[in-house]
Amino acid sequence: MCGIFAYLNYNVSRERRYILEVLFNGLRRLEYRGYDSSGIALDADGPAPSSASPSGASYAGAPPLVFRQEGKIENLVRSVYSEVDEKDVNLDTAFSVHAGIAHTRWATHGVPAPRNSHPQSSGAGDEFLVVHNGIITNYEVLKETLTRHGFTFESDTDTEVIPKLAKFVFDKSHDEEGDVTFSQVVMEVMRQLEGAYALIFKSPHYPNELIACKRGSTLILGVNELSGQQNGKPFHDVKALTTNGKPKELFFSSDLCAIVEHTKNYLALEDNEIVHIKDGSVSILKFDPHKEKPAFVQRALSVLEMEVEQIKKGSYDHFMQKEIHEQPHSLTTTMRGRLKDGEVLLGGLKEHLKTIRRCRRVVFIGCGTSYNAALAARPFVEELTGIPVTMEVASDLLDRQGPIYREDTAVFVSQSGETADTLLALDYALENGALCVGITNTVGSTLSRKTHCGVHINAGCEIGVASTKAYTSQIVAMAMMALAIGSDQISTQARRNAIINGLTRLPSCVSEVLKLDAEMKELASSLIDSESLLVFGRGFNYATALEGALKVKEVALMHSEGMLAGEMKHGPLALVDENLPIIVIATRDACFSKQQSVIQQLLSRKGRLIVMCSKGDASAVCSNGSSRVIEVPGVADCLQPVINIIPLQLLAYHLTVLRGFDVDQPRNLAKSVTTQ
């Protein structure tokens, strides 16, 4: 849920001011992952006040400069420059080698406050500093043990045990064996930790070195060689690239979007890998808790297929607004190369289609918006494949220990590919022998690595916390998956052709529906004082009702509920009066006549209706003109949810702006939910 970032320059002179700005900018790119507090650590000038640390272990130089602040990144930036002036720190000091670390936090253990912000420290002298994404599940046991050994804890975090444990290991090794390497310290720390984490360590005992490791949380290494770089080659050997002593910059990040402006050469760390940067070279070790010595690993750098423009707002006021309007392009990218001559080509599923066709059932598993996308896909997956489909919220599946069988195909849907509940459910399904399929937007994510096969939705970088373009691309990806699985059935050929034709028309239809922007802004202004909103849908658009209501909850901070229209008479009808706004989704599909009946029942009870219908159907859904009507272009009925959600996304966006709330960083939320 947090964002971690690090920058190391080697054999290239960088002023402290420049290093600061690189760290700050890295945090700005990761702020969507958490924004209630943040911090950085970098090196000071000159000799230490004493040649020995408080523990008696000496190190050269002054203790690192550590800055922590509550609130968003800009709070940290202001406080750092203020403190720098007070402490008379020279920002023009140049370093030919320097390692800095940074963190932006979404609070789990301890309220947002400087003492709970990262980097967390080993204590006086900051002998070990750590930034952490994830959760340490056995921190209470470790804390109790370290307290008995004389350590004093200052924060409420689970993270603080990590640097203190590193100091304990370091001191003990020095007492018993003499010298100990940074990687040996970190390996012993990893041996004691339980939970999911990505960690970056910095220590004045090991100046100009950084160590990163991970288990369950994403961590990226970026490499920018500043001279003699071989452009155009898709892969470089890490060792060959980094042992040559040439000037270079190295980065660690929770997300590719924080390194794209610096380099396109990257490596996604695997679980239990340790990356040690020393003297400009990168050593990759594979940690095994059952072995004393790790194995050295050879890895290759990949080339990032992302442009800097994708992580900038451009002419838009907010990322959410930009991402809503990017959907014609993102949907085109999702389908590019996958629809050819009336056929669907999904390379990631090709080898497993026969197994999926023979399975007992398909189980869709996700959380939040990703769950809603799977729910939108369920009807046409059942229709085109003839395979029963069940839905599971990942956390609930784990709570119940619901049955998953070897004959099942479990489809895991996650924008980030790092959602903790979804990954734990994936582990559960793998243990039970199911074929596991991933639907994700993030290449190299844990979900994409752990599943047997899958589909990348290729929607592009999504920075707004409320998912928009990823939702519609997920639906389209699952539509193509259903078409591929059902391609062996002659009886559904005509239906498949109609859906494929609908898919090719989809981007232009989305462009058309985006023209409702001004109308949705005007509707939002009429709802600004409402306390609640109901959204009714059924059939293909039950998921649209849930997702539309979720968007309003997330960003506009307004109570809203998506409801199955068929359940209206069984309770929700009691809420209807002339003040409560109700959106009814009544576009043309098999449920159209039923929705017409729902509209009449609501009107007879003086409901304040807003009806979404297909173009030309205004009189059919509201003959007396007493309701507000939103007309949208029609496509194949199973693809209509892609069109229908967009006015609701626009409505949520404009409601948020008009109500004066933060669109891209809604209260209490973060983009990538990496905690249970």
Image: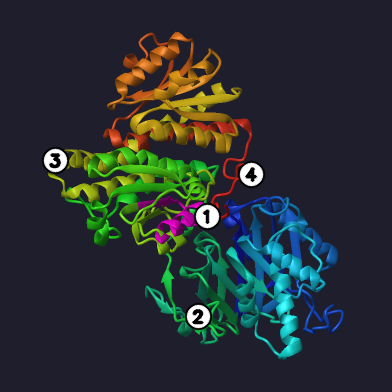
Q: Position of residue 420 (x, y in %)?
A: 52, 55
- Amino acid type, callout 4: Asn
Q: Position of residue 358 (x, y in %)?
A: 23, 53
The residue at which mark 1 appears reads as 420
Question: Is residue 207 covered in magenta?
Answer: no
Residue 491 is marked as 3
Q: CA distance from mark 1 to mark 4?
A: 17 Å
Q: CA distance from mark 3 to mark 4?
A: 49 Å
Sequence-wise, the earlier of marks 2 and 4 is: 2
Q: Residues within 10 Å of mark 3 (few under 14, many from 20)?
A: few
The residue at which mark 4 appears reads as 668
Which of discs 3 and 2 lies nearer the camera? The answer is 3
In the figure, is residue 62 to the left or right of 627?
right
Sequence-wise, the earlier of marks 1 and 4 is: 1
The residue at which mark 2 appears reads as 227
Residue 134 is marked as none
Q: Position of residue 475 (x, y in %)?
A: 36, 44
Q: CA distance from mark 1 to mark 2?
A: 40 Å
Q: Quadrant of residue 148?
A: bottom right
Looking at the image, is 355 positioned above or below residue 271? above
Q: Which residues are magenta?
A: 410-431
- Amino acid type, callout 3: Ser
In the figure, is residue 359 to the left or right of 169?
left
Q: Position of residue 409 (x, y in %)?
A: 33, 53
Mark 3 in CB contact with mark 4 (< 8 angstroms) = no
Mark 1 in CB contact with mark 3 (< 8 angstroms) = no
Sequence-wise, the earlier of marks 3 and 4 is: 3
SS of the residue at dot 1? Answer: helix
Looking at the image, is 661 positioned above or below residue 575? below
